[in-house]
Image (spheres, rainbow, N blue to C red):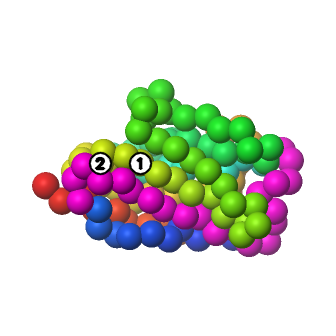
Amino acid sequence: QVQLMESGPGLVKPSQTLSLTCTVSGGSIRIRPYCWSWIRQPPGKGLEWMGVVCYDGSTDYSPSLKSRTSISRDTSKNQFSLQLSLVTPEDTAVYYCARGISTIPDKYWGQGTQVTVPS
């Protein structure tokens, strides 16, 4: 059973960089054909796909966030991470990590972690 868990600070100051880590258990992040996504949901809004790192280390990003987003992985720890730079209050959201195929998440998601950027 694949399990994902997000971790990181719950409060990030404006203009700083948001850093989150997703720890995966029950399956290697190097196993094809799986890709590992970051997705967020601002308060009162829908889900927004942010980016992905795949089994081969390749990455892809949402065009709207690409200039501020970096996703990396640590295969020795079976983790992948998100960095979002120059945050504003509009980046306040629940952030999720998820497994999937390419950019499409499947049923395995983390529980989500709240990140707040104060105004």
> Is residue 30 on the magenta stretch?
yes
The numbered mark at residue 87 is 2
Q: From this view, report whether residue 72 is shown above or below residue 21.
A: above
Residue at 56% x, 41% y: name it: 51
Is the Cβ of the residue at disc 2 closer than 8 Å to that at disc 1? Answer: yes
Q: Amino acid at mark 2?
A: Val
Label 2 sits on a secondary structure element that is loop
Q: Is residue 102 left or right of residue 72?
A: right
Q: Is residue 114 left or right of residue 31?
A: left
Q: From this view, report whether residue 60 is shown above or below residue 46.
A: above
Residue 17: % across, % down: 36, 53
Q: Amino acid at mark 1?
A: Leu
Mark 1 = which residue?
Answer: 84
Residue at 38% x, 56% y: name it: 18
The numbered mark at residue 94 is none
Residue 47: % across, % down: 44, 46
Image: magenta residue range: 13-33
Residue at 29% x, 54% y: name it: 16
Name which quarter of the figure residue 79 lies in: bottom right
Residue at 41% x, 39% y: name it: 68
